[in-house]
Image (spheres, rainbow, N blue to C red):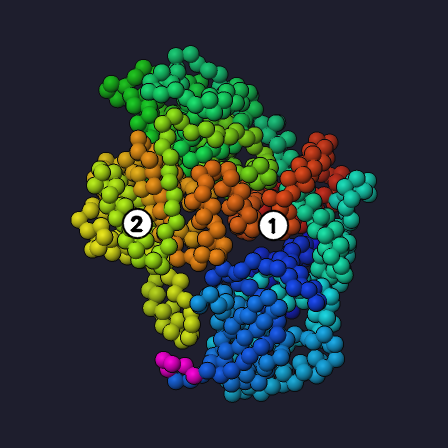
Amino acid sequence: MLTTASLLSESSVDPDLVKKLGGLELTTVGELLRYAPRRYLRRGHLTESERPEPGEWITVIGRIQKAQMISMKRRYGQFLKVVVNDGRANYEASFFNARWIQKVLKPGTRVAMAGTVKLFRDQIQLSHPDWMVMPEDDGIDVVGNAAMIGEMYAEGADDHDAGDGKDGKGQRGSTASADDVINFSRDIIPMYPATKEVQTWEIWRAVRQVLGETAPAEDALTEGQRTERGLITSAEAIQHVHLPDSLDEIESARGRLKFDEALAVQAELARRRFSAVAESAQSCKHVPGGLEDQLLASLPFELTGAQRDVLLEIGEDLVDEHPMSRLLQGEVGSGKTLVSLLAMLRVVDNGHQCAILAPTEVLAAQHYRTVMTMLGDLARAGELGAADGATSVGLLTGSLGTAAKRKVLLDAVTGDAGIVIGTHALLEEHVEFFDLGMVVVDEQHRFGVEQRDILRGKGRGDTRPHFLVMTATPIPRTVAMITFGDLETSVMAELPRGRQPIKTTVVPMKNQKWIDRAWARANEEIDAGRQVYVVCTKIGDEQSNAKRAKSKKDSESEADDDTVSVLDLAEQLAAGPLAGRRIGILHGRLPADEKNDVMDAFTRGDIDVLVATTVIEVGVDVPNATMMAIVNAERFGVSQLHQLRGRVGRGQFAGLCLLMTTASDMGQSMERLRAVEASNDGFELARVDLAQRREGDILGSLQSGGKSSLNFLSLIDDVEVIADARDLAEQIVLDDPDLLAHQPLADLVQSILLPSRVEYLDKS
């Protein structure tokens, strides 16, 4: 018998299907059995579903209403247009080289079709979808029909080289097997998140095979723990979630499986918290008259109440002889950088060094400029005019020249540099510190645990550096409990006095008058002596779209989904609505020195309009920039849009953010944009973002690459479940840190966390 740890390749599942399931990162029995159906179909009941977005992969089960061959207008030949109705809506599907398919996909046939959504005149279309003929309700004639269809398809394959079950355009067609006939006749059918490579019916087929070959695992909860929470066993839950006989079975199964996920993650986080208690760190007390006090005395403003509160929390952590592990989250522009700098100066005052880890060279360079500006002569140790007790600040990035890099590395290893700011280059093995006492990680969600812990190992001797993790992306409480459950949390929602409001407006790009007005507003800002950001989704030097454009012509009704690039838009603006303006370009593939030159020029006011990708998303601070136009804004998430617009309104003038979009008025994308337009509250928008993204990859703090392992747990609805699991995990881990006496729970952790993460976590 198989176990949850067994590889799928050890099962009777077809090897080709095992390979395709690997594309979903389903490689073990446990991963497959905990792969959650997205929804369920009930015989005789219509299920409500959200209108799919363009580009989304969907599966439709319904009956063919119409099927007809249509002559192409632009070239010789015909294509088959099929209209499928699922009881709620009609879906159009197009097939090319469909001579034999038309004999199968006839009006009245019940089918499943899966493909990428396109919209044309508000009609949902699937071009070249995969398909499978479905059994009818009685299940009697279907076996004969399926056999006949299979023979017919094989006959067509002889002439069209489609023996692999594909038509001339590459879509796959298939028919129901005998096992499919039986199971698709069930009252409730699960529908799984699928892709172009593997369909929902293939996933369900593999699940059924594996269920019959796997021995039930010992339950991670005792009978008393299950009874207290009203939970069924894990074995029952897995059976019911994939082969339910009633809605009640689905509900009870999901309840147990979401608790399993919460418990597995919280058990691992609890192990980390308890192991950190045994580590030692340098105790850093306040040094009267030190660099910290000197910077505070030089500030031309008072700290906000939130900044003072957080500094007290950090100060208490730094005095402790155990390493601080704290998450500092705050609104865009709330002053996190200043707080982190004051904390680092306390560590420097105690004779230790600090490092700032940033995700991009642009952000690292911005941090360097900001720190040097804030510190002034406090950061010029060894230079003429330096303040008494001054330190020095170094910048280390991958593209730094050899001589400059050698100097920074030398200053770090000798202790001459009190603060070293860098990108992933800081993580390289040859980077050493004389006495690293504190690490600040900016935008932690862009780094994995493994990267964070590389810096943890660069402390002096057996000590660990204090850790401050910062993010300007507000995090709902449930997300923080999962992704940063091994960290204490500080929140800064208060903005500094004088911070200007930002007005946000959605601009429909399908209306030229709106576009003209948007660029007119940019001209007005520039005429007033201010500056403008324009943000695009792509650079524009990617591979030519010519082939893709040509293939689009083959389809009679496909909408153009191209987005505007930095290079193209900069050229259009310079020749059109912003002619005569000083336009700069910034993106991630520019050489580092050129990126720095562009940002320096924009900061000085030598550039009127900066056309950029999202490299300016965080950390960039130009007080004179008052307007931002985000082109194709529907391509960005809510939190990212909130981050981007936080680059304006940072000086004495109010900010303006235009969300330029091609999204339809009724789609989810427009709902997302309207939410950003209506609110400047980052924490509220974070909740909206969480709901819109369907919770995505929320295992940020456990991430070493890969997708989310949480299929059932909702970070919107399951606050109480997560809190309960956290309490139970702490009780267990307090008495049994290595889970030696709780092997079923240890197995649960390994079956729920992806193998890549388990391997790393086992090394921790």
Horizontal and vertical percent position of residue 176: 66, 75
Toward the left, the furthest residue is: 580
Location of mark 1 (residue): 709
Position of 307 compared to 562: left or right? right
Q: Nearer the viewer, mark 2 or mark 1?
A: 2
Q: Residues within 10 Å of mark 2 (few under 14, many from 20)?
A: some
Magenta segment, which residues? 71-75
Which image quadrant is residue 180 in?
bottom right
Total marks shown come to 2
The quadrant of the rendering that contains the N terminus is bottom right
Q: In terms of depth relative to the viewer, which is nearer, 96 or 41?
A: 41
Residue 211 in the image: above or below residue 553: above
Kind of residue indicated by mark 1: Ser
Horizontal and vertical percent position of residue 146: 67, 80
Q: Magenta region, mostly helix, strand or loop? A: loop
Location of mark 2 (residue): 518
Residue 688 in the image: above or below residue 1: above
